[in-house]
Structure formats: structure tokens, C-alpha cells
Image (cartoon, rainbow, N blue to C red):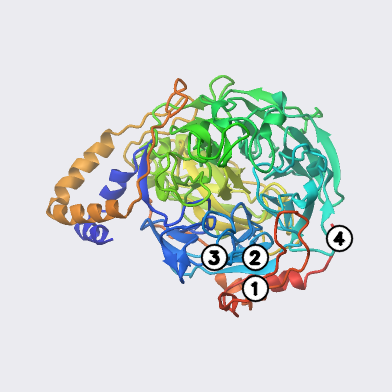
């Protein structure tokens, strides 16, 4: 920060991003203090990071730290004290911009179990964590002006859920589906004689948050897919039904009636749910496709049924089995009268398990992280390899893939993937790694920890180093700086105008207007190679080009169907010639649970053009958005670096000290990465962005409920929360508890 302040005094602050933001590259960002098993961005400034309970070196209130808040501008982490074990919880946005985490694991102590004196599945005195299997944790939106606050376990789920699915509905309600009752590799015993409950270890029901009057009901699909249904893949459809995929089966599910409509099986019986962990995403919803959802699946794993094993471990040596490179699309609710069907898409350049799709604000998708062989998860043995003889520590995967790839859904078949001029990271990002789109359009990459407890010396260690990856559009010298972006959007209603000054682009104004898109992106809650709730939608618009080069974008509100883009937080990007602006935070909908107001879509003005209009920005390379790669155009950046070095030569000593201190604080962990298919192992703008209004939050005293329901699992203790001063009355914020406790209880 001292260096940054001195650079500002000298008027050379632009040199800092020039040094850092090189298109197609990774840059070490800092130390997250905990391994980033989960992340979600809540403002232009802040990202929440959560780990499982384990023996991290940083301490807070007398025990290891399990969570932190990442400050995006300063690239530093601040500890927060989460009390319940969030290991393998689900997470989802809420209508007012908060995020909720649901379920998790039992309390654990050193070694990831309850073998230490006094440790139980309810509370561990060493790590001082509580059972999180029924916990609901709510994290509010925060920034440099609004403190980050959260509630841990003030209310509880009806059922214990570890690896549950979570999907928001059109009224903001979140449905939680399935899960384990406690830990394991896959969700079954073998032989599988009780596919519904597995002797008390599986949870085949669904429930809602906020809860209605309906008690949890069995979902037959979770029984059918027994074993391979952890973190079932779910996407809300325009009809209000939910697309659900697990094992190699697929359905359309009606959450109001619990009715299931079967869809075709996944081709080749490739498994995409955890622990096969294939990448999956909903492709952009656009006016051109009439906002019709198509789901893309890539990678994952195929093994025969026996090889998947049971709760304890896989029966096969997974790290020897190549991950799938196949990709498939499906349109679950086609509007042309055809039947839903999986369609083969272009194959991945490199097969991956634990690859993760990130929606980018140029309409493409980044796939990042993962491995060429094996599955997610960890184990100390398999059916044929005894404890102590595992070749990759406790990891069930090998061959990290360090080079990302970009998928262009609009490119012709056969040319949708590119790895051109995308560099590789030398940090293994395997099980428990995460990736997240940031407001400036970069991607934060963090975590990786295929270990039961912290292990810094194994081949794939517990990783605390975060990186930023800069997509190809960071080659631009100028990025759009849109003005007059609203803080809320509605479902239908009056259009609004966004102003683009001439300094935001170069070249003819008419060309810029014709090559502008407005993207609404929700990055989602990232964990286990997924981004729960991630969506990208293009807003319709027309434009007026003025002779002075100013462009006004007459922009539609969202389509009048909340099922297309559920209420809650999002970022709005304006992309000109493939180059996005910084994302502006806003709220979609009315910020409340319940039916969202809708209106007819207003008619947009006709396009107006000006032959004399042109942009005033320096000529900038456009992002190549045709799926064939992008040139990095580093010449201007090199020039800026040279100029910057000359300008700040007097600060050389300070710069060196800052770098030395920073390097000292980073936990470097590296392993040889694969960047080719041939190897198997191994803010430009200071403009203020909008946020939700914290005045809408309500105060709540924590009220931890006892859980006297008996555990059905034959190998776990009975649960009951123990009293603790950590769970005293609190002034922390829970924006929803009063709302949902007083809410009308209508069966769904």
C-alpha cells in the first residue's frame, strides 16, 4: 500500500495494472490464510473464503482459523471465526445480496476425525468446531464502507446434509437436495442393499430455505442414483421446473409436486457429479436463443459400477484412470417441439476431472484447474493399495492440468476450444481448489487440498496461495467505462439508458455500437469444481450514436420471468469489441423472498447512427471472440512497464522492500504441471460500483437449537449442541430469519 500511495503521488498509478495484468497469464495474488475450499464475491472489494476445519497455522480466538475475507484491491486476507464445520456444505445467493451456506460435516479434531481426547462428532475441544451438518450460515454483502458480518448456525436445516445440492427458485427460495448424513467417498455401501438410506448414512430427501409447512420429502431420483449423487447438478428452467443430473441419469423435476420426468441418460455413462467432478455450466441466455437454457458438461470420469467402491474408498486405483475429454450439450426445454437430447460437442483439449467453468464477460467460458487422471476426494488406501502406500499422498487424482482453455459456444463445431497463448500455472489445483470471476473480469484461483488435515510436505500439499488469471481481453489498452448503471434491475418494465463516453473505445462509433453486448453475470458460490448459481444473461438493447462519439445504450430490463435469472446479486458488464468494462454490482428483483413483480417488456427506441462519430481512446486490440485464441499484444504493456520503471526509479528501494515482504508472506506450493495433451502425470476504472443497501438488514439474537434426533448411521455419535460462550447472543446480522419465520407457510 505504501508503494501504491507513492506511485499515486508521482501520477504513475496506471503502471501498476500494466505490470500485473498481462493477458493469458497467471499472477500470484497473495496468501489466503486458509485453503480456499469455498469462495463467493459479495462486492467490488470483498470475497469470502472458507476452508474445512483443519489445523491451519493462523489462529483466531484460541484455535486454528477456518475462514477469511479477501480484500480484492489490497490482495490481503482478514481472519473470521466460523464455528461450524463447513466441509462440503452447499452455498447459494439470497435475494438481497447475502449468501447462505447449508450443511457441512460433523465436528472434527486433529487428523480429521474424533480420535483426540474429548473429541466428539458434536464438538471438538482442540479445533473448537461444532457439528455443521444441519448448520445454516448467512454472510452479508460488505465492502470498504460496510462491515462484513455473518451468522453461523442460528437456524438449522431439518435434515443433516453433507454434499447437498442447492438451487434457487424464481421466488428466491433455495431448495436443498439429498446429501450424505456424514462423510465418505461416494454415497453408498457395497453391496448396495439399501439405496434410499444406506443404513442411515444417506439423505434422499429435499427441503426448502426458508422452510414452509412441508416436511422433507423423499426424492425418488436420489434413490435411483444412489452412490453417485453427491452435489447433484441442478439448473432452474424457464418453466419453474428443475433440471437435475446425477450418476448418469437425468430428470426434469417439479419442486412444487415432486413429480419427475425422465430425460435421456448421459452418453457413455460418464459421471459428472462429485467425485467424478466434470465441468458443467448453463450457456449464455441471449435474445438470439430466446433465453432458452442449454447445459454444457465436459470431462468427468467413467468407471464400472464396482470400481466406484463405497463410503470408505474407491475399489479402483483411480489415479491410473484417465479422465474423460468428452463434452455434451442438452437443451432440457426446447422451444421448437423437439425432444430433449444430449448432443456431442467438441472434446476438451485435455481430459479433466475437477475442471471448472467460469462464465466470462465476453460470452465465452474458461475451464480451469483439475487433473488428467482419477477423481476428486482423498483416501489413505484403496481396495488394493494399503495405508501408507498411496503413490500421490492421499490424493485420488494425478496429473494436474495447469493450462486453462476457453470455450466459445457460438463458434462453429470443431473450433470451439482454444488454449492459444494461455499460460500455465505451476500450482497444482486439485481437490478443494476453487475459481471465481472478479469484478474486473479477472479470475481468482485458489485452494487445493487433497489431504485429510493440513499437509505441507506431500506431493499435492495444502495450498494457501491465490492467483489471478487474466483472460485474453486484458490485452486491451482501454476498457469501457459505462455510466448511469442502475443499482437494481426488474423483470420487465421500463428500459434504462447507459452512457458510453467516447474515451471508452477507439475506431468508428457505429462499429463500436454494433459490437456492444451487455452481460449480466452471477459468478455463484464456488466449491468442488462447481459454481452453484452461476448464470450469464445478455440484456437486449438498442443504441444512439452521437456525433461527439458518445454512445447511449437503451437497455431492456430482464425478461419478465424470474426463473431465467433468479432474484439476487449480479454484476453488469458492458462489452465493446470483445473488451468488457469492470462489473457493476446490482440487485436483480425486489430483494425479498416471494413472488417477484413482473411487467411487460418495454419497446426499445430504434437504432440511431452517426457517420462522423469515433472513439477518442488509443487504438486497442479487440478480444478475439471466435474461439480460435487471442493475441496478447504485449508491446504497449512492455512500453508502459519501461516508462513506469523510469518514473519510479527513485522508489526502487521501497519497491524491493515491499516485494520482499510480500514474497515472504506467500506460501508457495508447486508441482510440475501439464500444459499439453501429451503428458499424463506430473481495475482500470475508479468508478464507484453499486451494492445492496445494508439498511434493509434486521438484527437477530443467535438461538442455537439442540438436536435430539437420533443418528441412523451405525458408526456416528448422537448429536447435540453443547453450550459455549462462542454462541452467546450476538448483534450480527441475519437479514432473513424474521422474514421467513413469519412467512406464510404454503406447501410447495
Can you identify the residue that label 2 sits on?
122
Q: Secondary structure at mark 1?
A: loop
In terms of depth relative to the viewer, which is nearer, 121 or 685?
A: 121
Residue at 82% from the left image edge and 68% from the top image edge = 744
Determine if residue 14 is in view: no
Between the residue at mark 1 and the residue at mark 2, the CA separation in whole angstroms equals 7 Å
For mark 3, what is the residue? 82
* Dot label at residue 199: none
Which circle's residue, 4 or 1, is located before the other in the chain?
Answer: 1
Whether residue 219 is visible here, answered yes or no, is yes
User: Alpha carbon of mark 2 to alpha carbon of mark 4: how far?
Assistant: 32 Å
Mark 4 packing: few (<14 Cα in 10 Å), some, or many (20+)? Answer: few
Image location of residue 309, percent across then percent down: 68, 35
- For the residues marked 4 and 3, what is the alpha-carbon distance in whole angstroms? 33 Å
- Mark 4 element type: loop
Q: Residue sitting at 26 percent across and 48 percent down?
A: 15
Q: Position of residue 345 (x, y in %)?
A: 63, 24
Residue at label 4? Answer: 747
Q: Which residue is mark 1?
A: 722
* Separation (CA) of disc 2 from disc 3: 15 Å
Amino acid at each position: 500500500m505504501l508503494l501504491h500511495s507513492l506511485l499515486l503521488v508521482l501520477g504513475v498509478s496506471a503502471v501498476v495494472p500494466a505490470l500485473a495484468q498481462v493477458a493469458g497469464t497467471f499472477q500470484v495474488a497473495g496468501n489466503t490464510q486458509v485453503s480456499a475450499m469455498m469462495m463467493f464475491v459479495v462486492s467490488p472489494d470483498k470475497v469470502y473464503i472458507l476452508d474445512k476445519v483443519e489445523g491451519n497455522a493462523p489462529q483466531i480466538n484460541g484455535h486454528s482459523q477456518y475462514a477469511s475475507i479477501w480484500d480484492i484491491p489490497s490482495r490481503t486476507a482478514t481472519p473470521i471465526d466460523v464455528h461450524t464445520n463447513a466441509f462440503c456444505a452447499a452455498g447459494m445467493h439470497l435475494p438481497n445480496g447475502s449468501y447462505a451456506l447449508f450443511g457441512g460435516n460433523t465436528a472434527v479434531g486433529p487428523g480429521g476425525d474424533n480420535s483426540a481426547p474429548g473429541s466428539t462428532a458434536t464438538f471438538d475441544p482442540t479445533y473448537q468446531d461444532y457439528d455443521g451438518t444441519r448448520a445454516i450460515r448467512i454472510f452479508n454483502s460488505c465492502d470498504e464502507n460496510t462491515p462484513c458480518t455473518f451468522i453461523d448456525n442460528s437456524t438449522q436445516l431439518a435434515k443433516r446434509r453433507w454434499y447437498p445440492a442447492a438451487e434457487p427458485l424464481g421466488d428466491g427460495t433455495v431448495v436443498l437436495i439429498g446429501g450424505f448424513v456424514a462423510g465418505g467417498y461416494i454415497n453408498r455401501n457395497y453391496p448396495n442393499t439399501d439405496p434410499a438410506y444406506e443404513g442411515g448414512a444417506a439423505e434422499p430427501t429435499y427441503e426448502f430455505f426458508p422452510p414452509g409447512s412441508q416436511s422433507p420429502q423423499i426424492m425418488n431420483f436420489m434413490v435411483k442414483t444412489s452412490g453417485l449423487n453427491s452435489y447433484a447438478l441442478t439448473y432452474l428452467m424457464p418453466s419453474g421446473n428443475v433440471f437435475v443430473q446425477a450418476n448418469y441419469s437425468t430428470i426434469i423435476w417439479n419442486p412444487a409436486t415432486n413429480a419427475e420426468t425422465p430425460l435421456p441418460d448421459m452418453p457413455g455413462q460418464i459421471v459428472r457429479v462429485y467425485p467424478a467432478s466434470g465441468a458443467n455450466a448453463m450457456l449464455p441466455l441471449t435474445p438470439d436463443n430466446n433465453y432458452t437454457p442449454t447445459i454444457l458438461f465436459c470431462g468427468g470420469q467413467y468407471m464400472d459400477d464396482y470400481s466406484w467402491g463405497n463410503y470408505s474408498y474407491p475399489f479402483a486405483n483411480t489415479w491410473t484412470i484417465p479422465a474423460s475429454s468428452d463434452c455434451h450439450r442438452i437443451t432440457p426445454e426446447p422451444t421448437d417441439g423437439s425432444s430433449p437430447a444430449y448432443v456431442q460437442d467438441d472434446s476438451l483439449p485435455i481430459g479433466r476431472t475437477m475442471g471448472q467453468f467460469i462464465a466470462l464477460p465476453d460470452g465465452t467460458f474458461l475451464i480451469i484447474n483439475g487433473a488428467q487422471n482419477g477423481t476428486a476426494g482423498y483416501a489413505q488406501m484403496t481396495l488394493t493399495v494399503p495405508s501408507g502406500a498411496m503413490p500421490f499422498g492421499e490424493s485420488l487424482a494425478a496429473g494436474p492440468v495447469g493450462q486453462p482453455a476457453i470455450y466459445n459456444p457460438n463458434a462453429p463445431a470443431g473450433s470451439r476450444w482454444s488454449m492459444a497463448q494461455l499460460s500455465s500455472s505451476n500450482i497444482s489445483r486439485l481437490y478443494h481448489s476453487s475459481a471465481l470471476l472478479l469484478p474486473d473480469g479477472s479470475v481468482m484461483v485458489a485452494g487445493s487440498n487433497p489431504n485429510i488435515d493440513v499437509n505441507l510436505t506431500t506431493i499435492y500439499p495444502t495450498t494457501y496461495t491465490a492467483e489471478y488469471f487474466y483472460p485474453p481481453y486484458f490485452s486491451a489498452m482501454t476498457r469501457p467505462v459505462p455510466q448511469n448503471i442502475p443499482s437494481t434491475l426488474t423483470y420487465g418494465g421500463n428500459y434504462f439508458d447507459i452512457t458510453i463516453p467516447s474515451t471508452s473505445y477507439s475506431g468508428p462509433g457505429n462499429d463500436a455500437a454494433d459490437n456492444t453486448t451487455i452481460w449480466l453475470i452471477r459468478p455463484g458460490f464456488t466449491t468442488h469444481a462447481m459454481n452453484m448459481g452461476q448464470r450469464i444473461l445478455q440484456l437486449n438493447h438498442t443504441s444512439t450514436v452521437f456525433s461527439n462519439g458518445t454512445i447511449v445504450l437503451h437497455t431492456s430490463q430482464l425478461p419478465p420471468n424470474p426463473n431465467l435469472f433468479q432474484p439476487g446479486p449480479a454484476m453488469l458488464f458492458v462489452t465493446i469489441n470483445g473488451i468488457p468494462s469492470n462489473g457493476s454490482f446490482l440487485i436483480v428483483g425486489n430483494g425479498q423472498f416471494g413472488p417477484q413483480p413482473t411487467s411487460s417488456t418495454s419497446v426499445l427506441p430504434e437504432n440511431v447512427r452517426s457517420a462522423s462519430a469515433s472513439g477518442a481512446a488509443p487504438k486497442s486490440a479487440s478480444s478475439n471472440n471466435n474461439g480460435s485464441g487471442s493475441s496478447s499484444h504485449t508491446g504497449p504493456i512492455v512500453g508502459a512497464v519501461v516508462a513506469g520503471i523510469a518514473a519510479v526509479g527513485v522508489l526502487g528501494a521501497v519497491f524491493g522492500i515491499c516485494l520482499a515482504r510480500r514474497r515472504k508472506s506467500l506460501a508457495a506450493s508447486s508441482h510440475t504441471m501439464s500444459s499439453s495433451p501429451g503428458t499424463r502425470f506430473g481495475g482500470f476504472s475508479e468508478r464507484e460500483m453499486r451494492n445492496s443497501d445494508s439498511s434493509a438488514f434486521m438484527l437477530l439474537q443467535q438461538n442455537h437449537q439442540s438436536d435430539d434426533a437420533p443418528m441412523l448411521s451405525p458408526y456416528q455419535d448422537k448429536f447435540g449442541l453443547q453450550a459455549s460462550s462462542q454462541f452467546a447472543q450476538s448483534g450480527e446480522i441475519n437479514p432473513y430469519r424474521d422474514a421467513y419465520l413469519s412467512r406464510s407457510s404454503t406447501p410447495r
